[in-house]
Amino acid sequence: MNVYDLLNICYDIAPLDSVWSDDNVGLLIDREGDVGRVLVALDVSLEIIKEAAAIGAQVIISHHPVIFSPLKSITYSSPYGRRVMALIKNNIACICLHTNYDGAEGGINDELARLLGLTDVRVLVNSDGKYGRYGLLYAPQSLRAFAERVKHILKGTSVRAYDSGRPAHNVCVGSGRSGKIMDLAIKAGCDTLVTGDVSHDLLCEARDMGMNIIDAGHFATEDIMCDMLINELKKRSPELDVLKAANNIRPYTEV
């Protein structure tokens, strides 16, 4: 198998029909030669590149693109430049599956809905196509109780929440920073949005609209992609050695 064979398998898992128009996904760093070992991570950090080199992985598959905005230069003074040079130096390819994996059938948002116990799950469509998911909890519950459940299920250290006074029942989920789907969630009849990286402005909007919000954190709502992708790759290509990066950890601590 070469890197393009692997890329086609990845596109089968996360097709391009749900990628957002301003996103940068796919094969971002190329390599020649066979692929036998793959390292999966949420982000491509220097630590993860070093880990991949140490274990002999030929490819890193990440959720967040190692190159997002166009690079005008590649230098050691830029974190992007350091990562790109480290990948090329170690002959490690990088495939990134971002919004296409968020919105894909069987992707991250479907898994979020499943983990949180939503039933009658439907696709929330934005201007870029399918993305969030919404459905019903088995029974209405207080926002505090549901927020505690979200934190436990997603293995988060904490959550932030705005409680409108309405019970959580019709819930929308959007992985990562998906606050801009709130208006669509409201139109779909949702009373609660679970996402990450909720801004102050969005919390104020939720308060004015009477919408519950649970900010479970960007990392917690997307870290589930690693085990999902590993399982899918092993099913499709059992000959591949696919590992989750040991350095796939939150880039912060709470004090």
Image (cartoon, helix red, strand yellow):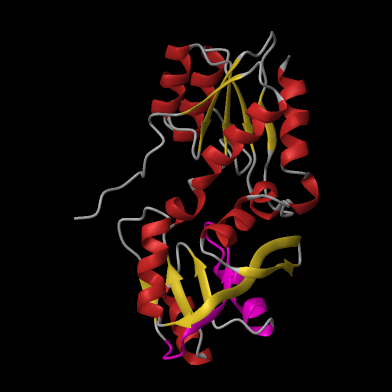
Instruction: Please determine whether, in this image, residue 199 is positioned above or below residue 4.
Output: below
In the rendered image, is residue 64 in sight? no
Q: Quadrant of residue 59?
A: top right
Q: Where does residue 88 sit, x and y in percent of width and height?
A: 57, 17
Q: Based on the picture, tell me whether residue 168 belongs to the magenta stretch.
A: yes
Q: Nearer the viewer, residue 105 or 20?
A: 105
Front residue of 238 and 7 = 238
Quadrant of the image occupied by residue 46: top left
Q: Position of residue 116 (x, y in %)?
A: 51, 63
Question: Residue farthest to the left?
Answer: 255
Vertical side of 223 occupied by 152: above or below? below
* Depth order, front residue of 127/114: 114
| Residue in the picture at 44% in, 50% down | 219
| Residue in front for this viewpoint, 71 or 112 | 112
Q: Pick the quarter of the image with the N terminus.
A: top right
Is 202 placed above or below 148 here? below
Vertical placement of 162 versus 180: above or below? below
Q: Residue at x 50, y 90 (%)?
A: 210
Name which quarter of the figure residue 136 lies in. Answer: bottom right
Work out which quarter of the rendered image holds the C terminus and state it. bottom left
Q: Looking at the image, which residue is at 46% across and 90% down? A: 166
Q: Which residues are magenta?
A: 164-187
Q: Residue 205 at x, y = what percent?
A: 50, 84
Residue, far top: 33
> Residue drawn at (55%, 69%), measured in percent from left and top?
179
